Image (cartoon, rainbow, N blue to C red):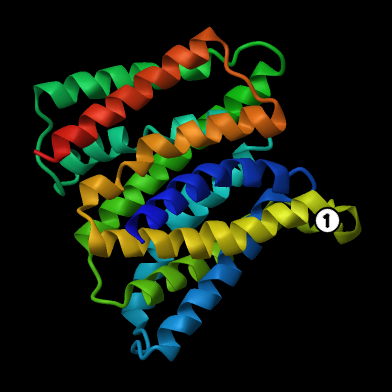
């Protein structure tokens, strides 16, 4: 069962970037994210409450609005918007740098120890890798691409800040209930973002392609529900450092799927930059096990 859960986590979360890219071909990005997370949140919340989880307090809802805003709306919803400008594989590779930001900001935020010498070298190599990866995208429509890359880096920063806030302000809650609340709140914020950007005026259900609907259903059912279930199961049965291996497996899956299905490619600079990121993340996570 553990092997199946790992396979699901690797393949599902690695494939969500491709699914997002396909979904936003004909769906407004923030409204797509709204539907995905709001529906998944309602399911998780309902299951948790039906299983006996206590009704959340006002303070717990406040916590969920903050964390859901950073993690769901900022860390995931903005990725959907960014992928209207850049390839899914590039988004996945930049997101893979999250452990680098977590190590640095986690130290500044007082939730983990000061990085050692090897960790500092890994951080330097990883951030140079991010810069190299972004620079490799120069060329056609570079202005739009650069905007997309900046958005994804912003997603990583928002996810990092939200994660640190969550660690510094832990809540004793059922994990299904807590995640459901965060998805509901994050989905609501995505709805506000979509409305403020005029996405309701561009929403045309008749124009949404069948493959975008399939991608949306995949993100809602497989990406959010099954993927999250696998993640929670692994956290209960494996050490966190082993579960965190998805950080450098998911982007590899994303690159392969982007190439096979969408014809996305990386140039030499892209391969060098992505290699630097993944090696740096691998070393950091290995250091964290010691």
Residue 31 can be seen, yes or no: no
In the picture provided, is 222 more to the left or to the right than 122? right
Q: Is residue 202 above or below residue 128?
A: below
Task: Please give the residue where the numbered disc 1 appears in the rendered image.
Answer: 201
Residue at position x 89%, y 53% in the image: 207
In the picture provided, is 82 more to the left or to the right than 290? right
Q: Is residue 178 above or below residue 145?
A: below
In the picture provided, is 75 more to the left or to the right than 264? left
From the top left corner, tell me how far across and down residue 185 is, in percent. 50, 68
Residue at position x 55%, y 29% in the image: 255
Residue 272 can be seen, yes or no: yes
In the picture provided, is 196 more to the left or to the right than 236? right
From the top left corner, tell me how far across and down residue 25 is, in percent. 76, 43
Residue at position x 54%, y 35% in the image: 254
Image quarter where the C terminus lies is top left
Which residue occupies the extreme right position in the image?
206
Which residue occupies the extreme top position in the image?
268
Residue 103 quadrant = top left
| Residue sitting nearer the eye, 36 or 193 | 36
Q: Is residue 283 above or below residue 244?
A: above
From the top left corner, tell me how far across and down residue 47 is, in percent. 47, 82
Residue 123 quadrant = top left
Q: Mark 1 falls on what kind of element?
A: helix
Residue at position x 54%, y 13% in the image: 136
| Residue sitting nearer the eye, 239 or 45 | 239
Image quarter where the N terminus lies is bottom left
All told, the count of numbered labels is 1
**Circle 1 residues within 10 Å: few <14, some 14–19, many ≥20:** few
């Amino acid at each position: 069962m553990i092997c199946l859960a790992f396979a699901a986590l690797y393949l599902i979360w690695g494939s969500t970037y491709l699914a997002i890219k396909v979904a936003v071909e004909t769906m407004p990005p923030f409204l797509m994210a709204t539907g995905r997370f709001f529906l998944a949140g309602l399911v998780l919340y309902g299951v948790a409450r039906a299983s006996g989880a206590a009704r959340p307090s006002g303070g717990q809802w406040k916590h969920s609005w903050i964390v859901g805003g950073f993690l769901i709306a900022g860390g995931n919803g903005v990725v959907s918007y960014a992928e209207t400008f850049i390839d899914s594989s590039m988004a996945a590779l930049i997101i893979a740098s999250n452990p680098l930001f977590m190590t640095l900001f986690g130290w500044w935020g007082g939730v983990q120890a000061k990085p050692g010498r090897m960790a500092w070298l890994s951080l330097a190599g990883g951030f140079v890798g991010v810069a190299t990866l972004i620079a490799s995208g120069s060329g056609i429509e570079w202005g739009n691409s650069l905007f997309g890359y900046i958005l994804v880096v912003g997603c990583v920063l928002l996810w990092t800040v939200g994660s640190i806030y969550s660690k510094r302000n832990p809540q004793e809650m059922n994990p299904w209930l807590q995640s459901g609340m965060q998805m509901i709140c994050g989905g609501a914020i995505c709805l506000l973002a979509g409305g403020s950007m005029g996405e309701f005026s561009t929403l045309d259900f008749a124009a949404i392609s069948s493959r975008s609907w399939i991608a949306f259903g995949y993100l809602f059912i497989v990406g959010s529900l099954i993927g999250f279930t696998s993640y929670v199961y692994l956290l209960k049965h494996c050490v966190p450092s082993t579960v965190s291996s998805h950080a450098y497996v998911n982007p590899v899956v994303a690159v392969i799927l982007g190439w096979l299905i969408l014809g996305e490619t990386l140039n030499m600079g892209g391969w060098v930059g992505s290699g630097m990121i993944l090696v740096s993340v691998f070393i950091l996570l290995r250091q964290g096990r010691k």
